[in-house]
Image (cartoon, helix red, strand yellow):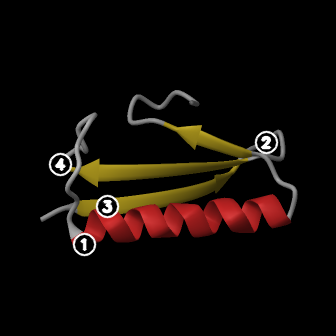
Amino acid sequence: MALLIISVQDLPDGTVSVRLTNEPAVNPGQTTFTPAERMGAVALNAIHSALAQEEKKLVLVGADGMPH
């Protein structure tokens, strides 16, 4: 079982920060995912597509709080 939280935040410079928190964390190289993890990926793809259509810059923020 996994718990995913997606946060979407407007930033002062006009960009949008999208943060996905996943408990337990997804490990590098992981090949099997829970239904919630798969839905989180679908949601992030939909957010990315919507932002791209609006020509907004997407800032992906990792678990460490740093942009990636």
Mark earlier in primary sequence (2, 4)? 2
Closest to the camera, between mark 1 and mark 4, is: 1
Badge number at residue 35: 1
Circles 2 and 1, Cβ within 8 Å, touching? The answer is no
Question: What's the CA distance linking mark 2 and mark 4?
Answer: 31 Å
Residue type, numbered disc 4: Pro
Q: Name the residue under label 2.
A: 12
Q: Mark 4 points at which residue?
A: 24
Residue type, numbered disc 1: Pro
Question: What's the CA distance linking mark 2 and mark 1?
Answer: 34 Å
**Which residue is painted at 27% across and 69% down in the image?**
36
Furthest-right residue in this view: 55
Question: What's the CA distance linking mark 3 and mark 2?
Answer: 26 Å
Which image quarter: residue 55? bottom right
Q: Answer above or below: position of 1 versus 57.
A: below
Left or right relative to 53: residue 5: left
